[in-house]
Image (spheres, helix red, strand yellow):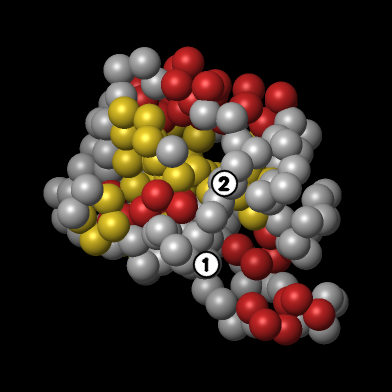
Amino acid sequence: MNYAEKPTVALSGDPRWVDGWLSSAHRIVSPNYDQRPDAMPVDLVVIHAISLPPGQFGGDGVMQLFTNTLDPQAHPYYAGIAGVRVSAHFFIRRDGLLIQFVPITARAWHAGLSNWQGRDRCNDFSVGIELEGDDETAFEPIQYQTLQCLLQSLQTVLPISAVTSHSHIAPGRKTDPGPCFDWAPVRAVCTDIAVVP
């Protein structure tokens, strides 16, 4: 079933969004998604960081991971994640390019085992945004600019009540987006919602 064609999240008439896809984002469709639970509001944004191979930027590893085309022979690290089925709604590259893999009307597989304020399975009610980065490297100003625009746009179509980190919803298991991520740009555009690093 193509869940992109069966919206389960009511969107407003914002012309930037069509069937859960943001028109300004570069689209690469991931097979790693499914339908959200019926009538569940999508009210959380989860910020992640990822680089493949770890600590290396600019390659195609993340796109390949999210589309199940990662070659396990291409790098020693890849052998350990071969067969993993994950995705995110969005990926922001170091140069600010915004890529969308899953429509926001569908459930991307980004959070894993997770809990937000007593609610398990954060994939059910969240949008996942990955930034190209790691725990040791400062993010680029253009990445924050793209993230701000995306967060502002998401707030026009979803009842977002909070933005948080992957590490907050999966403590002890995840550390991203890490200590180098600056939450001030997020707070600047999320003035009416909770920002919980």
- Location of residue 80 (image quadrant): bottom right
Camera-side residue: 108 or 118? 118
Rendered view: 180 above or below 64 = above
Camera-side residue: 144 or 31? 144
Rendered view: 121 above or below 163 = below
Tell me if residue 80 can be seen: yes
Residue 151 image point, x, y percent: 46, 28
Residue drawn at point x = 70 percent, y = 35 percent: 139
Q: Amino acid at mark 1?
A: Val
Decide which of tag 1 and tag 2 comes sooner along the chain: 1
Number of numbered discs overlaid on the protein picture: 2
Left or right: residue 140 versus residue 99 is: right
Residue 33 image point, x, y percent: 43, 63
- The span from disc 1 to disc 2 (Cα, nearest Å) is 17 Å
If the image is split into quadrants, where does the N terminus sit? bottom left
Residue 54 image point, x, y percent: 75, 62
Disc 2 residue crowd, few under 14, some 14–19, many 20+, Cα 10 Å:
many
Residue 19 image point, x, y percent: 39, 41
> Of the residues tagged 1 and 2, which is closer to the observer?
2
Residue 53: mark in rendering: none
Residue drawn at point x = 72 percent, y = 83 percent: 79
Residue drawn at point x = 44 percent, y = 63 percent: 172
Disc 1 residue crowd, few under 14, some 14–19, many 20+, Cα 10 Å:
some
Q: Mark 1 sits on what residue?
A: 86
Q: Amino acid at mark 2?
A: Pro
Is disc 2 placed on a helix, strand or loop? Answer: loop
Residue drawn at point x = 73 percent, y = 77 percent: 78
- Location of residue 197 (image quadrant): top left
Q: Mark 2 sits on what residue?
A: 177
Is disc 1 placed on a helix, strand or loop? Answer: loop
